[in-house]
Image (cartoon, grey):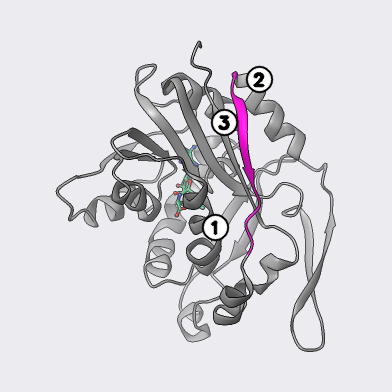
């Protein structure tokens, strides 16, 4: 599946996605993934930042709240309209349409680039990482989160005990990197009555192995400086039972890599 077809799926997902995340139903993002991402983020106050695959802008706004001058970029016009519609702050975020693989910016425009759960949603991840490298100033960094390549394999089945607690995950087809398989789901935390009236998301999957990701980073010229595998603490798992399964294996992988100051 090529990038344009993948983008068309996201355009169709965007309205329902925005509706549900703005009511707090993406508990994995809000309770586990984004807090860990932000905890690992260097100080961005006063820096020029680009958020690639910004969606409806939730995480871009959190970066703005940390004092960064933000630009958000996405392929979906529906997402971008929702993001722009949420702008109430005087320090406005600039939102632009475009692809991660052809960033509409000159070299060395940004001090940092983020991509929250977006790079695994496009086929040519190597080019997206090379593009992030190009638009960063020397010494700048790219920090991104993806579905964990080792635990988000094409075959994956969560195992629960008699009490309904997740305790293991059956994994397979790790080396199957065939593009464009479609996953269909809605956020598990959304009430069944609400989900009944909604068509499930259709998400094209571009699975890569861990080595593919790490090699893409070093081929682009980056130096890897941080790796994170977030999971819910016991208190969070108690308050939000949906995310208890993140204590079994990590669903997300966070990487931060730096463009050498001499590049
Ligand atoms: C899982 S959503 C994440 C959205 C947002 N970053 C968040 O964390 O809430 C993936 C996003 O990647 C975007 N996307 C997919 N392909 C893209 C591409 N080629 N270039 C830029 N964004 C893309 C989608 O439109 C969608 O907004």
For this view, does 254 lie left or right of residue 99? right
Q: Is residue 74 above or below residue 241?
A: above
Q: Is residue 204 above or below residue 242?
A: above
Counting from the top left corner in percent of width and height, residue 225 is at: 61, 33
Q: Residue at x 64, y 58 (%)?
A: 183
Tally of numbered discs:
3
Alpha-carbon span between mark 3 and mark 1: 18 Å
As for residue 159 lying within the magenta part, the answer is no
Mark 3 and ligand 1: say if the CB distance to the nearest ligand atom is below 8 Å.
Answer: no
Alpha-carbon span between mark 2 and mark 1: 27 Å
Marks 2,3: beta carbons within 8 A: no
Q: In the rendered image, which residue does mark 1 sit on?
A: 33
For this view, does 32 lie left or right of residue 194? right
Q: Nearer the viewer, residue 248 or 51?
A: 248
Q: Nearer the viewer, residue 191 or 33?
A: 33
Q: In the rendered image, which residue does mark 3 sit on?
A: 257
For this view, does 169 lie left or right of residue 123? right
Q: Is residue 200 visible?
A: no
Q: Which residues are magenta?
A: 221-231
Quarter holding residue 178:
top right
Q: Secondary structure at mark 1?
A: helix
The quadrant of the image that shows the N terminus is top right
Mark 1 and ligand 1: say if the CB distance to the nearest ligand atom is below 8 Å.
Answer: yes
Q: Residue at x 72, y 54 (%)?
A: 152
Q: In the rendered image, which residue does mark 2 sit on?
A: 219
Q: Which mark is first along the chain, 3 or 2?
A: 2
């Amino acid at each position: 599946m090529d990038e344009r077809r993948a983008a068309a799926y996201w355009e169709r997902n965007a309205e329902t996605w925005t509706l549900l995340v703005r009511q707090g139903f993406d508990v994995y993002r809000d309770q586990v993934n984004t807090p860990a991402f932000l905890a690992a983020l260097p100080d961005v106050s006063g820096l020029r930042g680009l958020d690639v695959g910004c969606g409806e802008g939730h995480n871009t706004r959190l970066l703005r709240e940390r004092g960064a001058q933000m630009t958000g970029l996405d392929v979906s016009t529906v997402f971008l309209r929702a993001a722009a519609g949420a702008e109430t702050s005087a320090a406005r975020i600039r939102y632009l349409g475009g692809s991660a693989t052809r960033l509409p910016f000159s070299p060395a425009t940004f001090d940092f680039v983020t991509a929250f759960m977006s790079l695994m949603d496009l086929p040519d991840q190597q080019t997206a990482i090379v593009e992030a490298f190009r638009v960063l100033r020397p010494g700048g960094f790219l920090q991104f989160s993806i579905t964990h390549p080792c635990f988000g394999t094409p075959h994956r089945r969560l195992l629960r005990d008699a009490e309904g607690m997740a305790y293991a995950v059956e994994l397979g087809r790790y080396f199957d990197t065939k593009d464009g398989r479609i996953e269909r789901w809605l956020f598990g935390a959304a009430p069944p009555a609400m989900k009944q009236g909604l068509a499930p998301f259709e998400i094209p999957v571009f699975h890569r192995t861990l080595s593919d990701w790490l090699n893409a980073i070093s081929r682009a010229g980056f130096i890897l400086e941080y790796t994170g595998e977030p999971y819910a603490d016991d208190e969070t798992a108690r308050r939000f039972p949906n995310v208890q399964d993140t204590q079994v294996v990590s669903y997300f992988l966070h990487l931060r890599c730096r463009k050498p100051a001499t590049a």
